[in-house]
Image (cartoon, rainbow, N blue to C red):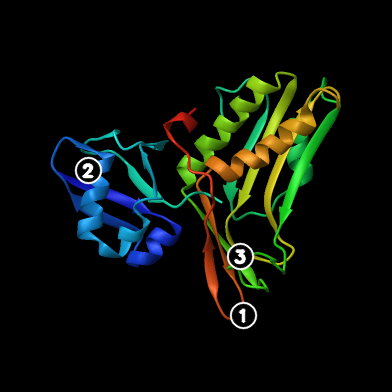
Amino acid sequence: MIVDIRLFATMKDKVGQPRIQVEVAEPATVKELLEAISQQFPSLDSSIETVLVSVNKAFAGEDTAVNPGDEVAMFPPVSGGSDLPYPTYFAVTETPVDIEAIHETLTQPDVGAIVSFSGFVRGQTARDGMPEETIHLEYEAYEEMAEQKMRQIAREIWERWPLVKGVAIVQQLGRLTVGDHTTFVACASGHRDQGVFDAARYGIDRLKEIVPVWKKEVGPDESIWVEGNYHPTVNDNG
């Protein structure tokens, strides 16, 4: 069978295109698919050991089955839902963050506190391997899966902090210059002592772990895709 595979970030750059097609025997597993990719696309071979694979927008393991017609994607580790019980706001967008509008979405008669985290593009990065000066960042995402994972994060927050009333998660995409918003996470509750601070911190940390979004740091002389250290498994599926 022929499997169509979507590529993101470094994977896309290495082959110079956003999709590849690979021929494998049917039935196939993710492990067999990766072996075929390594043989048919040598430029991706060095990434096979650390690459993440999703099948039908769920993280896949080596033994996950791949069937005809499945939606398959490959990407590096990652640096509104009617099924959710409280107000939510999820966005993967190039539209600037409107914090006041998001707060209005989360506000209810029993909400007395909203704690939020805002991330911005910084002009200097003191990390090994990164440009010392950042001119701009370029963000891209597996958008359909990203919004699913944002809803999953909200469910995880309510499992840990059931008194949290509302959750908002926003990831900006495209070209962002120094001082622009990159991420925004907000959690609402009746009172400030009902876990809302910890929930907001958990939200941004989890966003960096499981939401398939990547950034390229562009400096005066070089540009580098930033890859994370966390490697999601099938246990990270909600």
User: What residue lies at 72% left-to-right and 64% top-to-bottom?
Assistant: 122
Up-down: is 50 above or below 194? below
Q: Position of residue 112 (x, y in %)?
A: 86, 26
User: In the drawing, what numbered circle is on residue 137?
Assistant: 3
In front of the other: 127 or 65: 127
The residue that mark 1 highlights is: 220
Secondary element under disc 1, as helix, strand or loop, is loop
Sequence-first tag of 3 and 2: 2
Spot occupied by residue 149 in the image (x, y as percentages of width and height): 52, 36
Residue situated in front as seen by the camera: 125 or 156: 125
Most extreme residue toward the bottom, as rendered? 221
- What is the number of the mark on residue 32? 2
Whether tag 1 and tag 2 are in contact, CB under 8 A, the answer is no
Q: Mark 3: which amino acid?
A: Leu
Mark 2, Cα crowd under 10 Å, few <14 / some 14-19 / many 20+, is some
Q: Residues within 10 Å of mark 1 (few under 14, many from 20)?
A: few
Which of 53/181 is in front? 53
The label shown at residue 97 is: none
Near mark 3 (Cα within 10 A), the count class, few <14, some 14-19 or many ≥20, is many
Q: Of callouts 3 and 1, which one flags the residue occurring earlier in the amino acid sequence?
A: 3
